[in-house]
Amino acid sequence: MAPGDLDKIICSINFPTDENLIVGLEHADDAGVYRISDDLAIVQTVDFFTPIVDDPYCFGQIAVANALSDIYAMGGIPKTAMNLVAFPSEDMDISILLRIIQGGVDKMKEAGIVLVGGHSVKDKELKYGLAVTGFIHPDRILTKKALKMGDSLILTKPLGTGIINTAIKGGVASSESIDTVTKLMATLNRDAAKVMRDYPVHACTDITGFGLIGHLVEMVKTSELGIRIYAKKIPVLPETFSYAEMGLVPAGTYKNREFYEPCVEMAPTVDRFVQDVLYDPQTSGGLLICLDKENADGLLQSLKENVIYGVSIIGEVVSDPKEKIVVC
């Protein structure tokens, strides 16, 4: 789905609602939340996509980690999952699907969730993912839009997966890049989510297809606040800039730039290839956590002690320009 498509759909259709629906389509957040009782709500999300790495087992792991990420971003704990499979049975050996599902199941076991069912269809294009249900206390839900003036922004995974995946498809990615990006995308956001529960986090989202800039815009939209990002503090995967300089930039980067650029003030000192990374569509990206400055350093240190990959404070919430992203 292209940036903005969901907004158009929401505006054109009258969706059913319910008094116990806490977070639904009108909020366009990472997952939906429905109240079961005063102290329990369920968090629901769904995600699936085509292979982004050649190894079927690794693809299964990445697809599951990506699907679970929305639950973690909302502050929830995933509990059950259902497989979603589209498989070209006439053109591909069933053993490939077995490896994909095995990779997914092993990642589910790591996350501590159970597979309760699923659905498969015959398709010309291979796709795999999950529908996930998690639990959360109704008073502890994290959304994208609860950021506050002066808050710090912490990113828990480096950027660049879209560009490196394009290099993989082009057959030019180094074995080191392939190994690094595969491990990164297959890494659950569980540990980061667990750490942030001990801190007074105001807002959170996970960085996926709309890129860092796109998700930042979603956070400040209608907030009367803005965000300042420090480009040199953005963690980036090794070799990402080299591939970007070779022109190995996914089409989604240009779509993201075209849609979100009116909401961005980019300093002239920010290199073009750095801009590509900021708009780069991520797969199974990190959490973007927003909390007050007084607690940011403590959370950063705790994340560094518990999260495998690069973690950094990348920016802050500002009063002006309103509903804009300033990159300097």
Image: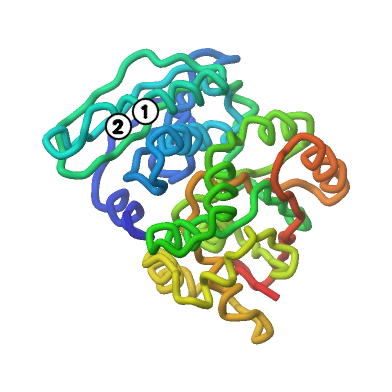
Kindly identify the amino acid type of the residue bearing the numbered disc 1.
Arg
* Residue at the extreme left: 90
Q: Which residue is mark 2?
A: 96
Relative side of 23 to 312, left or right = left
Q: What residue do we see at 45% from left, 63% from top?
A: 167
**Percent position of residue 290, x then y:** 70, 48
Residue 24 place in picture, x, y as percent: 41, 36
Marks 2 and 1: in contact by CB < 8 Å?
yes
Distance from Cα at disc 1 to Cα at disc 2: 5 Å
126 versus 113 height, above or below? below
Q: Nearer the viewer, residue 135 or 172?
A: 172
Q: Which mark is residue 159?
A: none
Looking at the figure, which quarter contains the C terminus? bottom right
Q: Is residue 196 above or below residue 291?
A: above
Q: Which residue is mark 1?
A: 99
- Residue 8 visible in the snapshot: yes
Rendered location of residue 321, percent (x, y): 65, 73
Q: Is residue 103 above or below residue 261?
A: above
Foreground residue, 279 or 103? 103
Mark 1 surroundings within 10 Å by alpha-carbon count, few (fewer than 14), some (14 through 19), many (20 or more): some
Residue depicted at x 49% and y 61%: 173
Which residue occupies 24% across, 52% down? 12
User: Is the N terminus in the top left, top right, bottom left or bottom right quadrant?
Assistant: bottom left
- Amino acid under label 2? Ile
Q: Please tell me which residue is depicted at 87% across the width and 42% down the height of the picture.
A: 298
For the question of whether residue 41 can be seen, the reply is no
Q: Residue furthest front?
A: 175
How many marks on residues? 2
> In what element is the residue under mark 1?
helix
Residue 54, position as x, y percentages in the image: 38, 45
Which element carries disc 2, helix, strand or loop? helix
Residue 296 lies, with reference to residue 117, above or below; the image says below
